Image: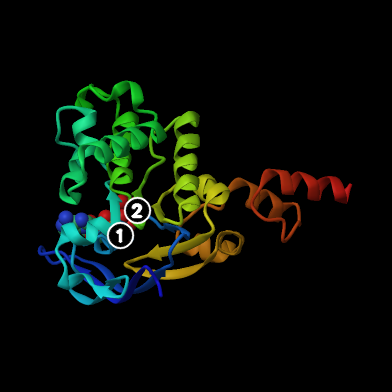
Amino acid sequence: MALVELEEVSFRYPGGTLAVEGVSLAVDPGESVAIIGQNGAGKTTTVKMMNGLLRPTAGTVGVDGVDTRTRTAAQVARRVGYVFQNPDDQIFNSTVRREIAYGLRRLRLDGKESGRRVDEAAELTGLRGLLEENPHDLPLSVRKFVTIASVLAVDPDAVVLDEPTAGQDLAGLDRIADITSHLAARGRAVVTITHDMEFVARHVERVVVMAERRVVREGPAAEIFADAAAMSAARLAQPAVVELAARLGLTGVGLSVDALADALRARS
Ligand SMILES: Nc1ncnc2c1ncn2[C@@H]1O[C@H](COP(=O)(O)OP(=O)(O)OP(=O)(O)O)[C@@H](O)[C@H]1O
């Protein structure tokens, strides 16, 4: 059974904007999925429904087969964690330690287990030396890791990362890739919303393309990126390695620079 399943889901904001229309989408335990698409395509609204922050105005969202409408947002968040696009929408505690520990209060863990979870999440996100800092004094790229750590500490079955790579330098990108690998190794599902096609090409298996409120294409990353017409219709740029391979007339090369270099050597 899928861990998260959206069936014919639509969402209209109270102001009247129809943001998502007829979306069906399933995420299996342990899989890594990227949702890509132009601004305003409905990506954030879709994932907010996965974690119970928003309830669909039509259709159903199931987590482990249970309709999210029958659960509180806190109960759904325990299973599907959501890291906000803007850390400042999520952070409100006065130290990094308190911020990471905040979501654990609902889990009624003993002090030792709670401390262990905070330390592990801080280690994974590079925050070990910053636990007593006020998160609001830290740069945006680090605040993003604070929000990731607070979701990791809860250890949900699925983690949704909304634009995790925005504003990150190379070390930050590597750290995000390490975090997603760590989650995969633990059998957790990861759903990433991103405009960073290079990151998707390197680290994500399955891609869902959204355009104008709907899912317009989904499949293995290599297949989607090779479909120039679909990418262009969704107003998305192909990763450089895919575009270069196509221009060189090399097909089926995949998404890695190494594979492209091998294919070129083999041809010459
Ligand atoms: N709180 C809100 N109230 C009203 N309309 C909203 C709200 N949030 C988003 N929208 C609208 O819903 C539509 C979909 O927005 P959404 O944020 O889901 O798209 P997105 O694909 O995540 O875009 P981006 O890449 O810019 O984050 C847009 O037209 C947006 O303006």
Where, by quadrant of the figure, is residue 102 drawn? top left
Count numbered badges in the picture: 2
Residue 133 falls in image quadrant = top left
Judge left or right: residue 196 versus residue 48: right
At which x and y percent is residue 208? 45, 64
Q: Earlier in the sequence, mark 1 or mark 2?
A: 1
Look at mark 2 in the image and give the residue it sits on: 160
What is the three-letter code of the residue carrying label 1?
Answer: Val
Spatial CA span between label 1 and label 2: 7 Å
Q: Residue furthest left?
A: 14
Give the residue at x 25% y 39%: 114
Q: Nearer the viewer, residue 181 or 265?
A: 181
Given residues 58 and 28, the one toward you in this image is 28
Q: Give x and y (percent) for residue 9.
A: 27, 74
Image position, residue 178 (x, y; %): 49, 40
| Residue 160 x/y as whole percent | 34, 53
Q: Residue at x 33, y 44 (%)?
A: 152
Please give the label number shown on residue 47.
1
Q: Mark 2 is on which residue type?
A: Val
